[in-house]
Amino acid sequence: MNTQDVISMFNDYVIANYGRLPKVITKGQNNTLGDLDGNTILDMFPGWAVSGIGHCHPKVVEAIRKQAGELLHIDNTFYTIEQGQLAKMLSERAFGGQCFFCNSGAEANEAALKLARRHTPREKYKFITTEKSFHGRTLATVAATGQPQYHEGFLPLPAGFVYVPFNDIDALHEAFDEEVCAVMIEPIQGEGGIHEATPEYMQTIRDLCDEHDALMILDEVQTGMGRTGRWFGYQHYEVTPDIITLAKALGGGVAIGAMMARPEVAKSFVPGTHASTFGGNSLACAAAIAVIEAIEEDKLLDNASAVGEYTRNKLEQLREKFPIIDHIRGKGLMLGLQLNMPGAAIVSQCLEKGLRINCTQETVLRLMPSMTVTRDEIDAAVAILDEVFGEGDSE
Ligand SMILES: *Cc1c(COP(=O)(O)O)cnc(C)c1O
């Protein structure tokens, strides 16, 4: 089977709801991908931030192998060691919360929204979210997503969502009333183009939520699990949220999502209120436990900070050289290059030269290398970017 055969198979049998790059990936090892034509690709956007500690991390692979021989799945009618241990490990690294497990970011956010409605008095039903946010693709999470293009064709959406401009403190005050049950934001907007919440904004959300008995939900699906140099994005701020949601890098490549809530809030989910058949199964939890252990044993939080800063400096040097790069945003290994032109062609040209990056919001190049990334790999990636930007200049 060659690349064209695989693409034909997709054309015939797979729903075409993704814009795909014309490569068939057959292998992923740490920060390198292999394709069906024998090319290798340096991956600076591994699995859309899922492979946060690199593809097929040996500790994760080993944990999966071991768990697969013991127990893959048992329903939540029973207890398992793996689910309990994972919840304890997450709780100890966050704010002492309690966890609900599911299988994706959208489901984690859906659980957070349901818990917030359930926990607060009946008259509170509104969710404040921000413009350019991204919270998932289920009907409720797409309604939470403050981007009209994702709503198109799906109306009417679940009611109660109010959108405010990100980092706009006045707009937040204006939107708040006694009907608000929660505010949900990403500490750094990912899909929205790498926009960081300011400390004042975070503090205002906390204060307004406290004042009005509303909950502060942080969608850490992309920022969580160490990418920013701390376990969770909120840990760069002085605030503690009531709920965080996780997915993407949590399982090291295995599907898992989690919602963690303060115990007083979590107690509003009693039997019968919410559930997930696959949620928290032993295989996924064993993988996530291995991810946490690998991050600590290999000191990957420190690596994310140090190599993140190194990358940022390298990108700043590129910016000085190429005026099409307007400025650079982000934290740790979550970086965006704001271009003053569309970036899709640059992504394709990089791929042709063996580098995978992403473009979001049309003009933002997004780099989210794994936390295992080395300075040499960053140098190689920046060299390719330099080449591609250089060719653009001479056209
Ligand atoms: C990717 C993402 C989601 C959705 O996660 P899925 O696993 O695709 O459902 C939600 N929120 C944020 C911030 C994300 O980056």
Image (cartoon, rainbow, N blue to C red):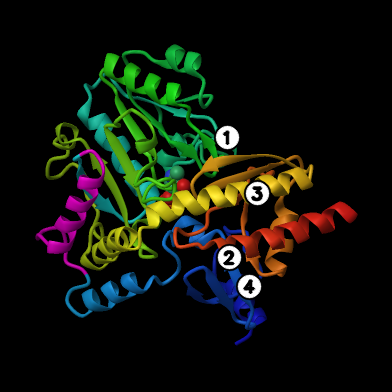
* Callout 2 touching callout 1 (CB < 8 Å): no
Image position of 18 with respect to 205: above or below: below
* SS at mark 1 in the image: helix
* SS at mark 3 in the image: helix
Quadrant containing the N terminus is bottom right
Residue identified by numbered label 4: 23
Residue 19, visible in the rendered structure: yes
Residue identified by numbered label 2: 376
* SS at mark 4 in the image: loop
Eye-nearest disc, 2 or 1: 2
* Callout 1 touching callout 3 (CB < 8 Å): no
Q: Please tell me which of labels 4 and 1 falls first in the chain.
A: 4
Quadrant containing the C terminus is bottom right
Residue identified by numbered label 1: 148
Eye-nearest disc, 3 or 2: 2
Left-right relation of 280 to 147: left
Q: Position of residue 69 (x, y in %)?
A: 21, 80
Left-right relation of 263 to 38: left
Q: Is residue 90 magenta?
A: yes
Q: Amino acid at mark 3?
A: Leu
Q: Please tell me which of labels 3 and 2 falls first in the chain.
A: 3
Q: Label 2 neighbourhood size at 10 Å, few (<14), some (14-19), many (20+)?
A: few
Residue identified by numbered label 3: 315
Q: Please tell me which of labels 2 and 4 falls first in the chain.
A: 4
Q: Which residues are magenta?
A: 73-95
Q: Label 1 neighbourhood size at 10 Å, few (<14), some (14-19), many (20+)?
A: few
In-front residue for pair 371/63: 371
Left-right relation of 349 to 240: right
Name the residue rendered at 38%, 31% in the picture. Answer: 237
Q: Please tell me which of labels 2 and 1 falls first in the chain.
A: 1
